[in-house]
Amino acid sequence: MYYSNPQLPGSSINHQDISMFHEILRILEYPKDVDLMIHSGGGVVEATEKLVKLIWSKVESLRVIVMEFAKSAATLLSLASNEILMSFMAELGPIDPLIQVGFDQVTKQPEFRPAWSYLHVLDILEEELKNKRDIRIVAQLLSVIDPTKLDIARKAIAYSQTLATEWMVKYMGIHPKKAREIAKKLCDSKRLLSHGRVISVEDACNLGLKVQKLDTDHELWPLLYQLHTRALMAVRPPVVKLFECRDHTIRGSLSK
């Protein structure tokens, strides 16, 4: 189980999670088949890639269980499973990456913005030029564009799409062409409009993902829902993250 509270600083998927995941796998004596319950708003794509490599170096099959939400990089992590078990109220989200823009002055935590938001500035410029607006507006927009950030944004989007495609092909057994189409749709901000857009279990099925719906009449529902609600109660200040298996719990807490 990997649960976090997205409303708290330090809750995102990051490189510090790797050792915690390995510890849980070690305690379980590296099982061949793993069910991973996820509740996360996302995080660092590079850390997610490393986490996926760690898990698959130790297991033979992986099923991700989403009771409420697994967004952004957590959706990306879900795509590295053989199957996603989603409750009727669960949601995934777009995988267009977030890039760091600085640090919050109050929390001292990194601040992130969707990579697509930088590229959309170019669309605005194109529209301004097409409509022959005041050239001073275009000049002002150009003055605030950082070419380096545009390059980072493009590469970050390509990186997420590449990982998603590779994982869907390798672990879900989806045809490469179909996997590329799904990855592109999950990164398409013009279609999805918001980085927080809800992708329901029905949406996920329509996209072509390997998804099974968990409804209230499912035999696993009572147990999984109880685990879910208890975990939500556990990730309250000062606890930010919860790593848990059958008989062991690791808690990540806010630093004082």
Image: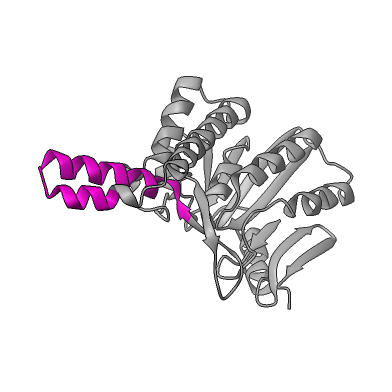
In what quadrant of the picture does the C terminus appear?
Answer: bottom right
* Front residue (pair 109, 251): 109
| Relative side of 58 to 3, left or right | right
Residue 83 coordinates in the image, percent (x, y): 59, 38
* Front residue (pair 2, 20): 20
Quarter holding residue 1: bottom right
Q: Is 53 situated above or below 47?
A: above
| Relative side of 168 to 88, left or right | right
Q: Residue at x 72, y 36 (%)?
A: 53
* Count of marks, rendered view: 0
Q: Main secondary structure of the magenta part?
A: helix
Q: Is 192 situated above or below 60?
A: below
Q: Residue at x 51, y 39 (%)?
A: 156
Residue 189 coordinates in the image, percent (x, y): 36, 45
Residue 29 coordinates in the image, percent (x, y): 89, 45
| Relative side of 217 to 27, left or right | left
Residues in magenta?
A: 113-141
Q: Can I make out residue 216 in this image?
A: no
Quarter holding residue 30: top right
Whether the magenta-drawn stretch holds residue 106 is answered as no
Q: Is 101 situated above or below 124?
A: below
